[in-house]
Image: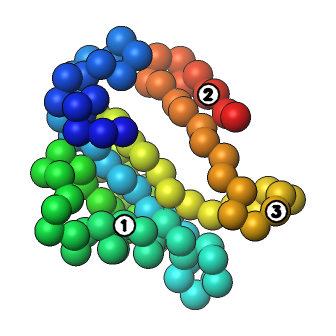
Amino acid sequence: MNAMVAKSGNLRGSPAIHHVLLLGLGNTLLADDGVGVHVVRQLAEDPERPAWLQPLDGGTLGFRLLDYLRQADAVLIVDAAELGACRSTRRWAAFWRAGLRANCW
């Protein structure tokens, strides 16, 4: 998502998006499983990070994540998973509040 989308709200008919939560999941003690945590920690220190993007280390927050999720206009989740695919294979999933419809490709 780029700044233009975040400012205009033109994300496939969605309402205006002003607060994007970038949620990093994982356990830093388990090899690549901590990738989400490392991504958000690095972005949190980036002085050029846009104000509308809130990186959050959600590694051990559990149910406490619900408040953060509820407050965000959009959520991007970074995590690692065993998919039975080649290393560095990426899967994208999009969920919408209306019915939590999922699209994976």
Mark nearest the camera among 2 and 1 is 1
**Circle number at residue 102:** 2
Residue 94 location in percent, x, y? 54, 33
**Circle number at residue 86:** 3
For the residue carrying disc 3, how many other residues have a C-alpha within 10 Å: few (<14), some (14-19), or many (20+)? few
For the residue carrying disc 2, how many other residues have a C-alpha within 10 Å: few (<14), some (14-19), or many (20+)? few
Q: Badges 2 and 1: C-beta atoms under 8 Å apart?
A: no
**Residue at x 64%, y 83% (from the top left corner):** 30
Question: Taking the image as drawn, is residue 63 in sight?
Answer: yes
**Residue at x 36%, y 12% (from the top left corner):** 13
Task: Say what amino acid the circle numbered 1 marks.
Answer: Val
Q: Earlier in the sequence, mark 2 or mark 1?
A: 1
Element on which disc 2 rests? strand
Task: Say what amino acid the circle numbered 2 marks.
Answer: Ala
Element on which disc 3 rests? loop
The residue identified by callout 1 is 40
Q: Nearer the viewer, residue 69 or 12?
A: 12
